[in-house]
Image (cartoon, rainbow, N blue to C red):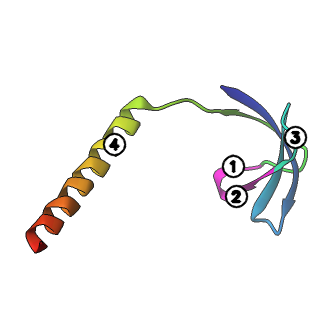
Amino acid sequence: MKLRVVIDRIEDGRLAVLEIEGVTGDFIWPVEFLPEGVHDGSILDFSIEANPEAEAEQRRKIKKMQEELLRRTREKG
């Protein structure tokens, strides 16, 4: 998914108020995560895509943690 974004304004040099094309309301984004040199009125394209590999890894980590907690609980009881 690709989003067209306009920087409405930058507040305190730290936060950008973004307007997303086709979306009602503003979105706040840290300036440090924007390309260098952007300013009020800059137009950006954001891409959002699923990352199934990272999701699977995260699920493995969570499962491992749950199993460890369950093991500890059983050892105490």
According to the image, label 1 marks what residue?
Answer: 34
Viewed as shown, does residue 51 lie left or right of 49?
Answer: left
Question: Which of the numbered marks, if any, corresponds to residue 30?
Answer: 2
According to the image, label 4 marks what residue?
Answer: 59
Quarter of the C terminus within the rendering: bottom left
- Residue segment shown in magenta: 27-37
Residue 77 forms part of the magenta stretch: no
Mark 4–mark 2 Cα distance, whole angstroms, equals: 28 Å
Label located before the other in sequence (3 or 4): 3
Query: Where does the image place residue 9, in percent across and percent down from the top left?
Result: 89, 54
In the image, 32 versus 76, the foreground residue is 76
Label located before the other in sequence (4 or 2): 2
Q: Secondary structure at mark 1?
A: loop
Q: Secondary structure at mark 4?
A: helix
Mark 1 touching mark 2, by CB under 8 A?
yes
| Image point (33%, 42%), residue name | 59
Label located before the other in sequence (2 or 3): 3
According to the image, label 3 marks what residue?
Answer: 24
